[in-house]
Image: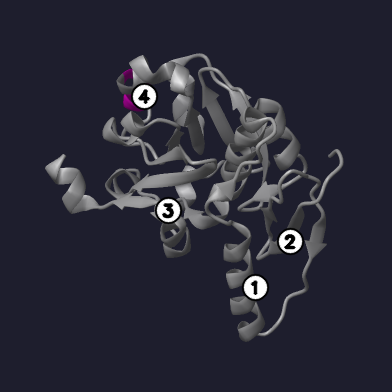
Amino acid sequence: MGHGDSRALVFSGILVRRLYYPYYKVRDLVTKPGPPSRVLLRVWVAVSLLIVPFPLPAQAPAVAEYRAKANYLANFPSFVEWPPEALPSGNAPFLVCVSGEFSFGTSLAEITRGSTVHDRRIEIRWVRKVQELAACQILFVSRSEQKRYNQTLDAVRGKMVLTVGETPEFLDAGGILSFFGQQGTIQFDVNLAAANKAHLKISSRLLALARHVVNQMEAAKS
């Protein structure tokens, strides 16, 4: 995994990490099952690991930005509930797909290597054909695809896919989550109306960490 200082723990079978800049090594700390009070405590510990905003160091800000976004993408599945029929069957992997330029592909592959979500191993896949997008559980749409947002999102509209972008226009186009960078930090916004249309349940813990949440009434006005 490389050198650095980052931490990880497993709760309810899900790997959760916290990233400490500027070091990024992941250590797996497996916890044993316990009584309900300890389980509840473990959940809150997991939430605390997904710190918002992620501070970016003065040195190599582009690299730090890639790391922060990769870490977010690796953790989002732990706070999103997919309908059972939306998850792959058997030993099929949980697909995190990418459409467009993928500046942090190496970072994301490194962070997710050997980890699982919802009892399925994570696989990072760069998708170039629109018809393949519906098979994904998470779809990251790069800013390079900004002019094709409608075409890309139309391919998964009505599907149970968590769409993630990195421009303000992404949520306006119907995306669910979008990264937002300001004053050396990486945060994210949520389009709750789009999540509901995709039949995805986003944890209130994740919503509490969002910079802004667009609810159904706000989306209807836009």
Q: What stretch is highlighted in magenta?
A: 151-155
Between marks 4 and 3 in the image, the one whose residue lies nearer the viewer: 3
Which element carries disc 2, helix, strand or loop?
Answer: strand
Q: Tell me whether circle 2 and circle 1 mark residues in contact (CB < 8 Å).
A: yes
| 3D distance between C-alphas at marks 4 and 2 | 35 Å
Please determine whether, in this image, residue 194 is positioned above or below residue 101: below
Lower sequence index among marks 2 and 1:
2
Lower sequence index among marks 2 and 3:
2
Lower sequence index among marks 4 and 1:
1
**Figure quadrant of residue 31:** bottom right
In front: 208, or 150? Answer: 208
Residue at which label 4 appears: 155
Is 196 on the left-hand or right-hand side of 141?
left
**Figure quadrant of residue 170:** top left
Lower sequence index among marks 4 and 2:
2
Which element carries disc 1, helix, strand or loop?
Answer: helix
| 3D distance between C-alphas at marks 2 and 1 | 9 Å
Residue at which label 1 appears: 42
Crowd rating for badge 4 (residues with CA inside 10 Å; few <14, some 14–19, many 20+): some
**Figure quadrant of residue 72:** top right
- Residue 62: % across, % down: 62, 28
Q: Tell me whether circle 4 and circle 3 mark residues in contact (CB < 8 Å).
A: no
Q: Which amino acid does label 4 sit on?
A: Ala
Between marks 3 and 1 in the image, the one whose residue lies nearer the viewer: 3
| 3D distance between C-alphas at marks 4 and 1 | 37 Å
Q: What residue type is labelled 3?
A: Ala
Q: Which amino acid does label 2 sit on?
A: Leu
Tell me, yes or no, if residue 122 can be seen here.
yes
